[in-house]
Amino acid sequence: AQERYASLVDKPATTRCGQTIALNMNAGLMADLPSLPSSGAEGVGLFRTELQFLIRNQMPKRAELSALYARVMDAADGKRVAFRTLDIGSDKVLTYMKPNDEPNPAMGWRAIRVGLDKPGVLRMQLQALIRAAAGRPLAVMFPFVAQLQEYRDARAEFDKAMERERRLGHPLPEKVEVGAMLETPSLAFAPDKFFEDVDFLSIGGNDLKQFFFAADRENERVRRRYDTLNVSFLAFLEQLIARCEALDTPVSFCGEDAGRPIEAVCFAALGLRSLSMRPASIGPVKHLLRQVDLGQVKAAMDAARDRGEQSVRHAVIEALRG
Ligand code: PEP
Ligand code: MG
């Protein structure tokens, strides 16, 4: 199987019906970057910057971060890297930043909430990213945005950081994209203005699913209780994708489910054209995508829902068997 996937490295994930799906990889450490050419990924759809903070026992300095981000961009060799700003709190705790004493950390003071309330670290990180990108494109996204104003405030921090660099006479990125991660159902119902303002959206399926079903992703008792291919979750995604299409908002999906072939095919059938996953999943996902007709998959999904099935999984697997 490994050889079969290796032969696909330079081939696009184009379905039998002629749709090409962009497959990107998730990363978080310098050590992940060598997988970029070997996996056949188009770029890094999610770079989890908190991993750098988690492996240390003190706050990194801006110059260190900037050098690190520049090395990541060098290693990506012109391919797009979407840097996600710090997502700490929840399951990721920085001993040197705050004690973890919240009753419900996943729903607590985490991610962009921390970044906006105590903007020192966010500002430092944005400056480091802007400096690292000097003369080349920069893509940044904010984690766990739950409402329009949070995106506006975070974007204002980014714009201020750009302005500061300009005033200092530092070279700026060649172009910037500032996006948001959609990880709470609320954001899918934000005003149109949000979808128009944001440069791109990335669906963080791991968190989105835990909040959609109110099922803790860390709790073994419940985390597998609800199928990602549950018709309710798919209906939610379908509406969201249609909204993004109508409002011209580029959207991708970067949760673990994007790396599962059946799930990936269903997401593509709902209209997603960009997925990001762990590098080892790219081969298997591409292999299956290249064999499917998305219209057929969609018909099987709709038929299963109309028959009152809870999950479309069985119907889709049957349809793929042909
Ligand atoms: C997600 O929530 O789907 C996601 C990609 O972010 P993380 O897994 O780091 O929370
Ligand atoms: Mg998340």
Image (cartoon, helix red, strand yellow):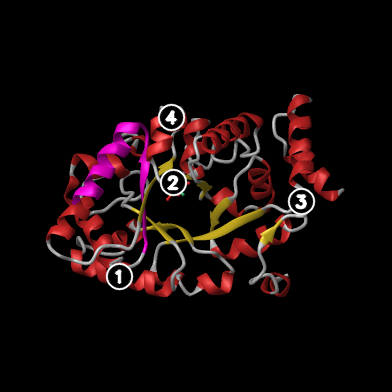
Q: Is residue 184 above or below residue 172?
A: above
Quote the CA–CA distance across marks 3 and 1: 41 Å
Quote the CA–CA distance across marks 2 and 3: 26 Å
Q: Are marks 4 and 1 in contact (CB under 8 Å)?
A: no
Question: First in sequence: mark 2 or mark 3?
Answer: 3
**Residue type at tag 1:** Leu
Question: First in sequence: mark 4 or mark 1?
Answer: 1
Q: Position of residue 167 (x, y in %)?
A: 13, 58
Side of 117 where 75 appears, left or right: right
Q: Residue at x 19, y 49 (%)?
A: 160
Question: First in sequence: mark 3 or mark 1?
Answer: 3
* In front: label 1 or label 2: 2
Per the image, the residue denoted by label 2 is 200
Q: Which quadrant holds residue 239? A: top right
Describe the element under mark 1 as helix, strand or loop: helix
Residue range in magenta is 137-160
**Crowd rating for badge 1 (residues with CA inside 10 Å; few <14, some 14–19, many 20+):** some
Question: First in sequence: mark 4 or mark 3?
Answer: 3
Callout 3: CB less than 8 Å from ligand 1: no
Per the image, the residue denoted by label 3 is 17
Q: Position of residue 298 (x, y in %)?
A: 74, 39
Callout 1: CB less than 8 Å from ligand 1: no
Per the image, the residue denoted by label 1 is 68
Q: Position of residue 251 (x, y in %)?
A: 51, 45
> Residue 139 lies in magenta, yes or no?
yes
**Crowd rating for badge 2 (residues with CA inside 10 Å; few <14, some 14–19, many 20+):** many
- Nearest the eye: 126 or 244: 244
- Tell me the quadrant of the picture where the N terminus can be found: bottom right
Q: Which quadrant holds residue 302? A: top right
Q: Residue at x 67, y 74 (%)?
A: 6
